[in-house]
Image: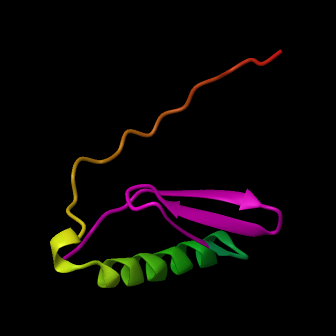
Amino acid sequence: MTYKFTTIITQEDKWYVARCVELGVVSQGKTIEKAQENLKETVELYLEDQPKSKKYSPKKAPLITSFELTHA
């Protein structure tokens, strides 16, 4: 089965942190590419570890948005 996940990557110090929005799974790497690669592996392990009754079932894609806030 092929899944499509949403990834958010941020830089924290010298590391890139990759988050899978749908599963809440996180990984990291020294480069963006390595963070993505590590996240894929982490998600694969996460899905393998789920009991059959709780297997991931894709739903609608999450809504990703942003907002501005001016703080005094």
State the residue at coordinates (39%, 62%): 23
Q: Position of residue 17 (x, y in %)?
A: 64, 65
Q: Is residue 21 magenta?
A: yes
Q: Position of residue 26 (x, y in %)?
A: 55, 67
> What colouring style does the render use?
rainbow
State the residue at coordinates (27%, 68%): 3
Magenta part of the protein: which range? 1-27
Q: Position of residue 21 (x, y in %)?
A: 44, 55
State the residue at coordinates (53%, 79%): 37
| 26 to the left or right of 43 | right
> Which of the image's four quarters has the N terminus?
bottom left
Q: Is residue 72 above or below residue 63?
A: above
| 42 to the left or right of 55 | right
| 38 to the left or right of 3 | right
State which quadrant residue 49 falls in.
bottom left
| 6 to the left or right of 29 | left
State the residue at coordinates (23%, 47%): 60
Q: Is residue 11 above or below residue 71?
A: below
Q: Is residue 16 magenta?
A: yes
Q: Is residue 68 above or below residue 49?
A: above
